[in-house]
Amino acid sequence: MTTPLYFPVAGCGGTAKPSAAGYDKRWLVVDAASNWLGTGKCPRLAEVAVEVNLGYLVLRAPGMLRLDIPLDVIEDDDSVRGVAKVGSQSVDVVDEGDLAAAWFAKFLEQPCRLVKVHPEAGRVLWPAL
C-alpha cells in the first residue's frame, strides 16, 4: 500500500501528512511576469521541503531559515490579488507578501513571488510537473 503525497506548493517537495490533503497545490511560485515556475523552469523548487503543521505552511530549503505562512487567511484586500499564468490558463491568486517573495527570490536566485490560488478561483489544470 502506497501513502499518497501532497504538494501544497506546486513544484516543491511533497508531504505524506494527511493534514496537507486539503492544501494540495494551493500555492505556487511565479516569476516577475506572473508565470508559474514549475520544476521544468526552475529545478531548485524541488529542493524546498513543505509541511502543513499547526495551522501553518512550513517551508525549508538548504541554506535558508524556516519560513512559516498561515494557512487560512481571509483574502479581502484587493491590493494583494492578481492573476498568474499556469500553462495557458489564467488563475486568480493572492500574493503572500514581501517576506515570502524575498525568501524564494534568495533561494531561487531570481525575482519571484509566492502566491496562493484564490479560494473562489476555478479548478486549476496543472501541466505535468
Image: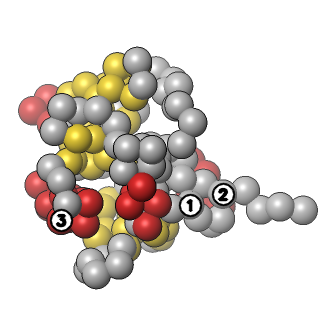
Closer to the camera, 98 or 111? Answer: 111
- Answer whether residue 106 is visible to the viewer in this image: yes
Say left or right for 92 vs 23: left
| Marks 3 and 1, how far apart at CA | 21 Å
Say left or right for 39 vs 66: right
Q: Are marks 2 and 1 in contact (CB under 8 Å)?
A: yes
Image spot of residue 113 (x, y percent): 21, 47
| Marks 2 and 1, how far apart at CA | 6 Å
- Name the residue: 90% across, 62% down: 1
Q: Determine whether the residue tagged by mark 2 lies in a helix, strand or loop.
A: loop
Say left or right for 68 vs 25: left
Residue type pointed to by label 3:
Lys
| Marks 2 and 3, how far apart at CA | 27 Å
The residue singled out by tag 2 in the image is 5
Q: Determine whether the residue tagged by mark 3 lies in a helix, strand or loop.
A: helix
Closer to the camera, 75 or 10? Answer: 10
- Answer whether residue 74 is visible to the viewer in this image: no
Residue 14 is tagged as 1
The residue singled out by tag 3 in the image is 106
Residue type pointed to by label 2:
Leu
